[in-house]
Every structure is written in C-alpha cells, then in structure tokens.
Image (cartoon, grey):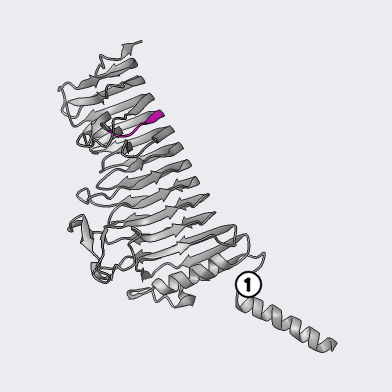
Amino acid sequence: MERSSITFLFLVIALSSTFDIGYGQNGTFDVRDFGATGNGLNDDSRAFLDAWQRACGAVGEIQTLNIPIGRKYMVKPVQFDGPCNSKNIVIQVDGSIEAPSTIGEWTGCELGSWLGFQNVKGLTIKGAGVIDGKGSIWWRQKPQITNYTTGTNFAAPAALRFRYCDELALSGFTSLNSPNKHIMIHGSNGVDISSVHVYAPEYSPNTDGIVLYGSMRVNIFNSVIKTGDDCIALKSGCSFVNISRVACGPGHGISVGSLGRHPNDRVEEVSVRNVVFYGTQNGARIKTFRGGCNGYIRGISFSNIRLVQTRNPIIIDQYYFSRWHAGNGEIKVSDITFRGFRGTSASNEAIILKCSNLWCTNIVMDHVNISSMIPGRPTYSYCENANGRSSFTTPDVPCLKKQ
C-alpha cells in the first residue's frame, strides 16, 4: 500500500512537469513547441494561440511566451484574451512576426486589429524583434474594403491593439509598416512604452505611431517614431500622460485630439518634453471640432522642444474638420504651456492659435524662438480668440500679454 502511494505521488509530479501545470512557478512557452515553423510561409497563427492559452492559463508569478530569433513567423489576425492566471505575462519577441502578404488572407480582423490583446493585466511585450504589418498592400486600397472570405467590409486594421490591459509594458521591438495605426491602447491604466521603433513611409495613410484612448498614467519615452500620420495622438479620456525623449518625423507631430465628436470628450494633465520634430507636418498640436460636443482640454505642457523644418511648429486649431456640426457645444481649451521651443519652421506662420468663441484661456509662451528654415525670412504668428501671456517669444504673439 505504501509503495503504491509513493508510485502515485511520483506519477503526479511527472505529469505536472510534463503538462506545465506550474502552480506558483514560472514557465516559458516557445511557439516552436506548439508547431510554429517560422519559415515565413506557413500559417503559424494556431501555434501562437495555443502557446498563449497555455501561458495565460498557467499559475505563477511570471509566464513567458517566447518568439525566437532568426525566424519569420507568418501570423494571420488573432486575438489574445485574458484574464490570465499568472500575475505577469511576458511575450519575448526576438524573431520577426509578419502579417499575411495578401489581403485575401486577412480573415478575422473585423475587430480592427491584426494582433489584439484584451483584459490582460500585467502584460509585457519586449525584445529586439520586428512586428511587420506589411501595410503597403492596404495603403493602395479605398478606406473600406471587402473581406473576401466573409463578404463583409472593414477598414484597414491596426497592427497592435490593447483593450483594458492595465500595467502594460512595451519595449525594445520595432513596429514596421502597419496597415493603419501601429499601436492603439484603449482604457488601460498604468502603461510604460520605452525604446520602441515605429516606422512607415511618409506617404502611408493613417499610420499613426501610438494612439491612446481613455487611458491614464501612461509613460512614453526613449523612442523613435517615423510614420505617415501622428507620431503620438491622445484621444478622449486620457490623463496623466508623460512623453519624453522622443524623436518624431516624418509624420504629423504629437497631437491632442481631435475632440468634440462625442459628449464629454476630455484630455488633461499631459507633459511632453525633450522631443525633436524632424520635418513633420506639425509639431505640438491641439485640435478640436467646431460645433461639436462639450468637453475640455486642460493642463497640457510642451517643453524643451527642438524643431527641424517643422511646417506648423505650434498650432491650436478649434476649427479642425469645420464641416462637423453634430451639436452646439465646444471643447474648452485652457492652461496650455509652450516652453523652451527652438529651431526652424518650414512655413511663415510658425505659431497658430485659432480658437473658437469660447476662447483659449491661460495660454503660456515662454522662451520660444522659432526662425524660418530659409535664412533671413521672418516668421509670424496668427492669433484668434486666445489669451494668456508670453515672454521671450519669437515670433511675437500679439494677443498674449507680454511679461
């Protein structure tokens, strides 16, 4: 009886090890062990999902999903869902993840993303690998195209989409040629993005680098973003966002907005500092709809900004998409600071404050020096319905009180 009990105990231990039950332990799950070939041709989607389900289901402090170096994994649109049993899930991206090379292979992305994550707390994606969206096949299409498998219509998908992923960390990897936006984050609290590289050609439509919706306590730093649209865009519901040491360009700059399309749109407590804009369409931009819904943008600071041939270095535009007339409300813009700007403008109007009848209030310009990229040509400012103060600012902003 005693011998059979011991035999049974060893059998349980062996089975636990074999099937990675791992209660209270850490584990690593390599996609190759689940059938991924990594030859760039075979569909490795099922292997990625199977590896995810095992890692997400394991119990322990940290579970790691490993995507090894030296291989190219072709993955069709997939959704990685939580919640997971482990406190932390790490996806180690050292190889290359590649999207399908034809639109006909893009099945299942009606949710608007290629690689989607939802309800995963404590998720980390890191490594020196590449996430290649092969977006050029989409950039030539109309905004809405047909899913050839289901017959339904959908817009070009984002490469990476995170919904309700608190304590999210992204670092190290390269996001290349997304069909649409590269990294989209919705409703997440506590996000760190560092040392990421985001690339798409200047002519690629809607390839924003990082887009935040309804997220708070977000840090973005030490990153390079070169795209065809906003380097970073902050949409409604974002607060306590810090952006630092980012190289942006080409692209449309760093934007707050557009806001006013939905009731109670708001963005507040944002700090953008130590950023370089290289040949961007805009630099520091705030944009709202005219005649939209009520809301506010407040407590936004841009500081220590370098400009290299930036077309609109500083712009507040409350007439963005002025054909929008869904309501009689307005977005109130207040407590906006532009401090320590230096460099060159590609247009004569280096500063544009185009505010609505509600006015933009408490606008601060301090130590702003923007010259023309053409030596000897003066720069100007345009100011409508804005008040506040300025000091040591070139070009002069006449509607702001000099100090």
Q: Quadrant of residue 239?
A: top left
Q: Which residues are magenta?
A: 292-298
**Camera-side residue: 157 or 135?**
157
The residue type indicated by label 1 comes to Ile
Magenta region includes residue 240: no
Q: Is residue 211 left or right of residue 67?
A: left
Image coordinates of residue 189 in percent, x first then y, are 50, 45
Image coordinates of residue 227 in percent, x first then y, are 27, 48
Q: Quadrant of the C terminus?
A: top left
Image coordinates of residue 383 in percent, x first then y, are 24, 20
Q: Is residue 83 visible?
A: yes
Residue, x 36% and y 47% (percent of image)? 210
Residue, x 48% and y 51% (percent of image)? 164
Tally of numbered tags: 1
The residue carrying mark 1 is: 21
Magenta region includes residue 293: yes
Q: Is residue 240 above or below residue 210?
A: above
Q: Is residue 328 above or below residue 56?
A: above
